[in-house]
Image (cartoon, rainbow, N blue to C red):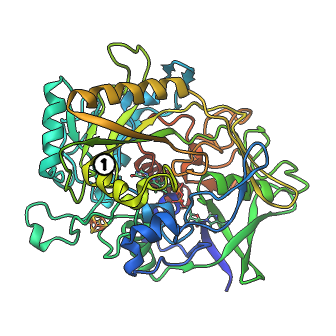
Amino acid sequence: MNHYDIIIIGAGAGGGTAAYSLAPTGKRILIIERGGYLPKEDDNWNPEAIFQRRKYQVEEQWLDHENNSFKPQAFYNVGGNTKVYGAALQRMREQDFGEVNHLAGVSPAWELTYQDMEPYYTRAESIFKVHGTKGEDITEPPMSAEYPFPALPHEPRMQEVADELGKLGLHPHHLTLAVDRNVDDPDNSPCIRCGTCDPYPCKIDAKLDAQIACVDPATAYDNVEIKINTLVTKLITDDSGQKVTAVEVEVEGNKAQYTADTFIVSCGSINSAALLLRSKNEHHPDGLGNSSGMLGRNLMLHNHSSVVAIAEKPNPVKFQKTLGFNDFYFGSPDHDYPLGQIQMTGKSKWNRLALFAPGSIPQPTLEYMADHAVDWWLTSEDLPDPNNRVTVTEEGKIKVDFTRNNLKAHEDFVDMWQSYLRKIDFFLFMVNTVPLSAVWHQVGTCKFGSDPKTNVLDLNCRTHDLDNLYVVDGSFFPSMGAVNPTLTIVANALRVADHLKDSLG
Ligand SMILES: Cc1cc2nc3c(=O)[nH]c(=O)nc-3n(C[C@H](O)[C@H](O)[C@H](O)COP(=O)(O)OP(=O)(O)OC[C@H]3O[C@@H](n4cnc5c(N)ncnc54)[C@H](O)[C@@H]3O)c2cc1C
Ligand code: SF4
C-alpha cells in the first residue's frame, strides 16, 4: 500500500526531528531520503578522506550568480548535514527574535518570541543530549532548565588560552555540545573525545546527529518506515491546487508515487526551495506555495571565517571544540553594531591547512603550523535579502544567486580578534573566509509569518497556499542571529510537530 498519513521528505535535522516527535502518535509515517546510511569505516576519521577527497560530500554541481558551476559542501544521507556537523547546539539569543540593527541594515524581528520557543529548546537539548554549563555565556537567554549534561572540560592548552583571554576582560564559556560524553566517568563513555569530530562523521555513533538522536529512534516504531536512496522529484496537487496528494520519486532511474494526507518537506533550505519550485503546475505556475513570490528568496548562509592562530607554544589538544566567547555578539567598545560569535573548530591537521593555500606551503611547514595552531571559528549574522535567491534552471539545475552582505562588520570582527590573540602571544594567522560552496548554515528560503503576501509559510510552518504542506527545515527563518542554526531548527520542528498532533487528532 502506497498511502500514508504523513510523508516526510528529508531525514536531516528538521525532518528527523518531526519523525521522532510524530512517531508515538501511531500515524502511518513514511520518511523519504535521497541518500543512504553513511557507512561506518576508517575513512570517517581520516583527514585526507575528508579534506582532500571530500569523500562524503555530494557530487552534483550548482550554479552561482554568474552561472559558474560549483560543488556545494552538502551531504545527502540519513541524518543530513548533521552527520558531519560540529555538534555545537546553541539557542538563539533573546534579542535575536526582535529587530536588531546591524552595520549593513536591520535584522528583522520574528513574529514569535524567544519565550514561545524556550520550551522547545529545552526539549531539543534533552533529545540531543546537550552538554553545557548554564550561566557562563554572557549572552545566554533565560533557560527554564539546566543543560541535561555537564560541559566538556577544556584540555590544558585550551584552559590556558581561556584563562589568558579572561585576564584581558573577556568571558570564556564552554561550548554547548551534542556529543555523548560521560564527563564524570570518561573510561565508560560512548564518546572518546577523539581528534576528528568537526567536520567528520562519528565512526562510533557517539555524536548526537539527526540519525542517532531522531531517525533511528523514530524508525524503531512499527508505524514509521524509511525509504533511502529515494529522490523526491516533485509534489503533485489535486485538481483544485489546494492540497498535495502525492510525491513523485526516482529510485535508480525508476519513477514511483506515494500518496499521503499530510506532507512535510525538509530537504534543507536550498533543496526544499528547489523542490517546491520544480513542483510548479497550472495552479501554482511559480512553484508550490509561491503566491507571495518569496519562495527561494532571503537565503542566508552566515559570514564565517576560520582564524588559525599560531604561537610558539605547541597545542597538543585532541578535542579542541570546547571554548567560546560571545563578548562581541552585540558589539564591542569600538563597534556599536553586532559582530558575532567566536567558537573553536575541530583541531586543524596539516591536510586542512593545505586547503587554504593549495600547493604553496610544503607539508613539513604545514605540519609545524598545525602542531602550534589554535583554531578559531568566527560567525557573523548576514541579513535576509530577497535578491539572495535559489532558482532552478530550465535544465533543472540549482542556481544560488547570492551576494554576501554585512561583510564589513565581519571583517572588523576578524581583525579585532587577531589583535586580542596577538596580546597573548599568537604571532601568525591564517584567515580563511568561507566561499559560497560552504552552504552549511543555509536558512531562509521559505520564510514564515502571518501575512501570506510576504511569507511562504504561516507561523505553524504550513504553506499559506496549500492546506496540507509543511516545511520544517531551516527554510522558515526570517533572520538567523549569529549562532549555529541547528538547535533552532530542531526546536521549531518539535513545535510544528506539536501543532500537527493537535490538528491531525
Ligand atoms: C561541516 C558542517 C558543520 C556544521 N556544524 C554545525 C554545528 O556545529 N552546529 C550547528 O548548529 N549546525 C552545524 N552545521 C549545520 C547543520 O548541519 C544544518 O543546520 C542542519 O543539518 C540543517 O538541517 P535541515 O533539516 O535544514 O537540513 P539537512 O540536515 O541537511 O537535511 C536535509 C535532508 O534532506 C535530504 N534531501 C534533500 N533533497 C531531497 C529530495 N529531493 N528528496 C529526498 N531527500 C532529500 C538530504 O539528503 C538531507 O538528508 C554544520 C554543517 C556542516 C556541513
Ligand atoms: S569526539 Fe566523540 S562524538 Fe565526536 S567523533 Fe569523536 S567519539 Fe564521536
Residue 468 versus residue 170 in the image, above or below: below
* 54 and 106: which is toward the camera: 54
Residue 21 in view: no
Q: Secondary structure at mark 1?
A: helix
Residue 144 versus residue 438 in the image, above or below: above
Residue 117 found in image quarter: top left
User: Is residue 384 found left or right of 137 in the rendered image?
Assistant: right
* 200 and 444: which is toward the camera: 200
Name the quarter where the N terminus is drawn: bottom right
Residue 375, x across and y down, in percent: 32, 46
Residue 446, x across and y down, in percent: 65, 44
Query: Disc 1 residue type?
Result: Thr
Which residue, given by chain and number where applicable, does mark 1 sit on?
Answer: 122
Determine the residue located farthest toward the right in the rendered image. 282
At horizontal 54% and vertical 49% (from top left) the residue drawn is 474
User: Is residue 482 found left or right of 139 in the rendered image?
Assistant: right
Residue 99 in view: yes
* 316 and 163: which is toward the camera: 316
